[in-house]
Amino acid sequence: MITFKSRNRVFLLLYSLESIEFAKTEYSSSLSINNHRCNHRKDCRSLNYYCEIIEIQTKEEGDYTIISHSTKDLIGYIHEKNFTLFDLNINKIQSADNGHYNYQFKINLYRPANTSFILVVTTTQELEQGDFSITVQGPSIVSIRHQSKFSFCFKSFFENLSLRI
């Protein structure tokens, strides 16, 4: 509380400083020939990009920010469950490219407690390899796990394909 006086008046200023702390979780990996191959261009169905599939699980409800760090120009795609490596834009919840400094992505999203989602990290250049890291900030730490099995990934593509026939 701050009070100050002026001619014939007394002012009372009430204020509150609320400190909000964010938990930070780090993940590091690299894109290489050992990764999955995917496509993010709408005009092509070839798998000309290396990508990493990452499962992120929240512990608490709240707003989360995901930021990439690399010397490569990265793109991030958020999916609930179903997606296809043939077109990462299908069923995406959100994607980001160059939303942060140095051609990195920054994704802000609200998540309920105890839920998981998929982050797919890839580059803007075909078959580009290199190291990257991801920082997730939010109300609590998250669980981050490399997803090597992707049998669920193709379901969406084949459902879409059958709708077009």
Image (cartoon, grey):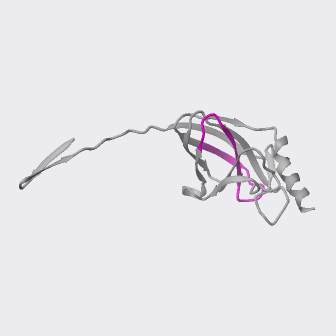
**Which residue is most to the right?**
165
Q: Position of residue 153 (x, y in %)?
A: 81, 46
Q: Residue at x 80, y 43 (%)?
A: 34
Q: Position of residue 99 (x, y in %)?
A: 57, 57
Give yes or no for residue 126 being in the magenta stretch. yes
Give yes or no for residue 67 being in the magenta stretch. no
Magenta segment, which residues? 111-134
Q: Residue at x 36, y 39 (%)?
A: 18
Say left or right for 107 vs 150: left
Q: Nearer the viewer, residue 153 or 124?
A: 153
Q: Nearer the viewer, residue 102 or 86?
A: 86
Q: Residue at x 78, y 64 (%)?
A: 42
Q: Position of residue 78 (x, y in %)?
A: 68, 49
Q: Residue at x 85, y 59 (%)?
A: 46
Q: Quadrant of residue 133?
A: top right
User: Would residue 75 be seen by someone viewing this image from the given angle?
Assistant: no
**Which residue is most to the bottom?**
43
| Quarter of the picture holding the N terminus | top left
Is residue 62 positioned above or below 100 on the image? above
Q: Quadrant of residue 45?
A: bottom right
